[in-house]
Image (cartoon, helix red, strand yellow):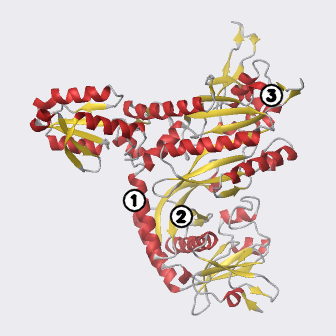
Amino acid sequence: MATAFEKVGGDRSVVVARINGELKDLSTEVSDTDIVEPVTVDSPEGLAVLRHSAAHVLAQAVQDTFPEAKLGIGPPIKDGFYYDFSVEEPFTPEDLSALEKRMIAILKSGQQFSRRVVTEDEAVRELESEPFKLRLIGSEGGAEVMEVGGSELTIYDNLDRKTGERCWGDLCRGPHVPDTRYIPPNAVKIMRSAAAYWLGDQDNEQLQRIYGTAWPSKDDLRAYLTFLEEAEKRDHRKLGAELDLFSFPEDIGSGLAVFHPKGGVVRRVMEDYSRRRHEEAGYEFVNSPHITKGALFEKSGHLDWYAEGMYPPMKLDGEVDADGTVRKQAQDYYLKPMNCPMHNLIFDARGRSYRELPLRLFEFGTVYRYEKSGVVQGLTRARGFTQDDAHIYCTLEQMPEELDALLDFVLGLLRDYGLEDFYLEISTRDPEKSVGTDEAWAEATAILRQAAERQGLDLVLDEGGAAFYGPKISVQAKDAIGRTWQMSTIQVDFNLPERFGLEYQAADGSRQRPVMIHRALFGSIERFFAVLLEHYAGAFPPWLAPVQVVAIPVTDAHIPYLEEVAAALRAKGVRVEVDTADDRMQKKIRNAQRAKVPYMLIAGDDDASAGAVSFRYRDGTQKNGVLIADAVDEIVEAIDTRAQV
């Protein structure tokens, strides 16, 4: 019989084969009736295989260097791979440097990846010194772990290319590249190490995780490292401190931000513009409290499906006599993790008619979610944040048109903030983590899919990724350096109206159940703030900039003149400051540039006598002798049109 490698006749760009629809090693024997397709390293599947193989090489390098290290798991991930180890001491930077050199030596040696099927008993005997692998063979891990979960239990041996002797081996279901020379030595890098819990469970042992990256070529690696450098410059946590926008005081707690005056300006402008657009689109504004009785979340189902993501309850309203007699049992109160149950109560506060539908309720509602400390990350993954949350109640007949209008609305608003490159993701039901009937889910998913397809954007399937109450569409946006961020989400929900008994009176006088659509435009104000901050690298367009203009006098004698210019700008609603510090003019210019202020207006004797200013832009270009009225008009027009300058 021939091998898959012989069938595809590939070069080193072909790393595995798809045989009858399943990824297999190129060494797999195939028959004439098998359908064999090459999988190249520049495909997502091929690149994942390359990185999975690199993870094995890392593990071999660790055990060559630290023989007592015990193996955890080592999967490919986005942009790289990792491997977990149990070691006595955390890895040092010097250790990582030595491990990278050992990896390169293994890659150059051309060791072959050889798949071997074993029984469970054989695997247990062979891996008796690897306690975590033994636990994978048992009940831990599951099908999602790369080591186990296939139809067979397999071990991959790394064989010496010349002698065929076994150099190392690992429990794994594969597949892998044929040999280590398929992984370019100059396209692999160890990035960092960190503590990690076994299988991501904080109740388990703590291990040491080494992260690495691997690419098809040296140029690909160089491009990725350049991208990381740019991403680091744009990190919103770094920019937030440098530009005095927000902070995370330890006295408040992890994942809970405070916004400083300049950050507060940006946030207010974002919210004000969003409010205006919502008013134009027919939304009605509501408000709800931050805390509620636990019974509300029992009714909604959140305590059944979302309790781990909620802050612990507070026992309130209990009454106890001096002798200890309980007069009234205390009740559980929770900080709200979402706004939808309260909006349902607003809908249900009085009778509703079909003439009121669609009813669009909107709130900037602050919610609290007890994220694990390991996943809290600045403003993008916080424990307290404000959602721009809307819930639309409509009839089944109105839903397709409403979904079309919703998608048009959210995409248009995101474009107003400067995001342009989108695709849509549709998340479907996980039967084990959902409520409602199959029929309702199927109908909601079909209507959502049709609405998404009408937008003409790429549509990606997120199978099993929906919330417990209904399928959703999420808008995925790419930023200035090509990263993808999940933005708006739109979820169709037949279940919460049922659980809350929501009704409206139809035209024929009957009582009918509305359809509920959940819609968060930004996800949260804080997260969207972070996305825009990184997208613009802190250089917000004029309409969003906390300070839009800095007026810089050549000498102190020109301050009164520039105060008059500033007054003319403020009369037009422009946020302007006059720099009256003792610094020299050039330092004031540098300070304004570091603060990423869009416009600088500089004035000396000639400018003052001519009723003009020198008009300097953020990029360093400058126009001299610009009349004050013309300068004001240019700035106001850029702000009013939301120009991206």
Work out which quarter of the rendered image holds the N terminus and state it. Answer: bottom right
Q: How far apart are marks 1 and 3 (CA)?
A: 50 Å
| Upstream in sequence: badge 1 or badge 3 | 1
Label 3 SS: helix
Kind of residue indicated by mark 2: Asp
Tell how many labels.
3
Which residue is located at x 76 percent, y 77 percent?
A: 118
The crowd level at tag 1 (other Cα within 10 Å; few <14, some 14-19, many 20+) is few
The quarter of the picture where residue 562 lies is top left
Can residue 334 be seen in the rendering of this structure? yes
Pick whichever, 430 or 620, lies toward us. Answer: 620
| Upstream in sequence: badge 2 or badge 3 | 2
Q: Distance between the residues labelled 2 and 1?
A: 14 Å
Residue identifier under label 1: 229
Which residue is located at x 65 percent, y 35 percent?
A: 310
The quarter of the picture where residue 628 lies is top left
Is 444 rendered above or below residue 154?
above
Q: Which of marks 2 and 3 is in front?
A: 3
Kind of residue indicated by mark 1: Glu
Pick whichever, 584 or 100, lies toward us. Answer: 584
Residue identifier under label 3: 500
Kind of residue indicated by mark 3: Phe
Label 1 SS: helix
Q: Where is residue 331 in the image (x, y as percent from the top left)?
A: 72, 20
Q: Position of residue 181 (x, y in %)?
A: 53, 83
Residue 607 appears left or right of 573: left
Q: Where is residue 440 in the image (x, y as percent from the top left)?
A: 84, 43
The quarter of the picture where residue 605 lies is top left
